[in-house]
Image (spheres, grey):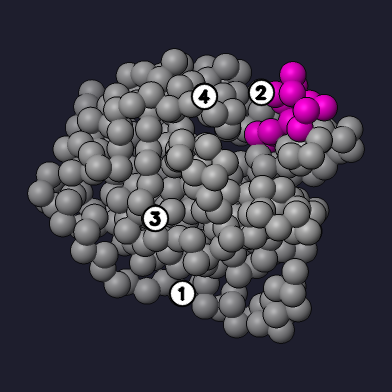
Amino acid sequence: MTRRVLFIILSIGLLAACESNNNKENDKPKNAQNTINQAVPDFNADSAFHFVACQTDFGPRVPGSDAHDKCALWLEKRLSSYADTVVVQTFRARLYDKNAMNGKNIIASFHSDASKRIVLCAHWDSRPFADHDADESNWGHPIDGANDGASGVGVLLETARILKQHPLNEKLGIDIILFDLEDYGPPQSQAMNYYDENNYWALGSQYWSSNPHKAGYHANFGILLDMVGGSNPNFMKEYYSQSYASWVSNKVWRKAYELGFQSYFSNELGNPISDDHIPMNTIAGIPTIDIIDLQPNSVNNSFPNEWHTLNDNIGAIDKQTLGMVGTLIINVIMDETKEK
């Protein structure tokens, strides 16, 4: 892609722009949340969009690339300006092709000593293959991953910014984990060679779940955000989320309904999705759900049409969707501050 040339020329300016943050309001989520609880901080959808754009401006964040390295430093710096502590967990994992790859999980914590904890997560790497692109000549190209990865990270960065401005009760701790090497599974053309092996995706989550950043770490529950920035989303209750952590899923969906988001959060059971929440449930033992846009009527019968294509760029991101999901997350957090 030609984006790398443009990135080299503009990198200093882009980084400077991404260090600033505008404060425009997004009326839709603001109005929805204020009808529920005036004490809940507003989630700024424009700010979340800005954070998504900052990531895609680096170019495809494929592990081992220059863009990946630069984005990791930016994420660490940005989270360090908000959170109490930030840990960069380096690891090495074996890919589907038996080659090894270095990865970085980035963990930001608020109130690290609190026993009651919520873990919020997303993956920050992007797919090295546009293997679902309509043009087969693009299959070998990496993608920007604006929705598939950056959208969840953008919502969590804005959440961290809000938690800095509006500190929680010290009895509740929040951990934001940005997983690496989630999207380096085998390309579509080779998928059948690995049909019975499920461990080539979500490698960063697998590593963290077996080696948490803090000895004896546990959270009351977790929420994974994946593809939460597309237009007209369909957030169904993902099958594994409902199987492993139905009480968490039901809690979050009830809050979505209270906020007036029932047109986008369906009570219908969605397909099982192998994602970062699987090792969190099965290895770490943390009840974790996946808020993910499921589109059964899309061209790929599963996800938004831009999924794993070159069209998964900043143009695919809808601020209102970011604002809706962010508003939901902030409200879920604030509800937990009231519960004993």
- For label 2, the residue is 210
Confirm whether residue 210 shows in the render: yes
Residue shown at 30% from the left, 51% from the top: 324
CA separation in Å, label 1 and label 4: 39 Å
Q: Which mark is residue 231?
A: 3
Q: Which mark is residue 180?
A: none
**The disc labelled 1 sits on which kind of residue?**
Ser
- For label 1, the residue is 20
**The disc labelled 3 sits on which kind of residue?**
Ser
Residue neighbourhood size for the residue with mark 3, other residues' Cα within 10 Å, grouped as few (<14), some (14–19), many (≥20): some
Number of numbered discs overlaid on the protein picture: 4
Q: Secondary structure at mark 1?
A: loop
Is 86 situated left or right of 26 in this image? Answer: right
The answer to which of 11 and 243 lies nearer the viewer is 243
- For label 4, the residue is 272
CA separation in Å, label 3 and label 4: 22 Å
Image quarter (top left, top right, bottom left or bottom right) of the N terminus: bottom right
Compared to residue 21, the image places residue 191 above or below, namely above
Q: Are marks 3 and 4 in contact (CB under 8 Å)?
A: no
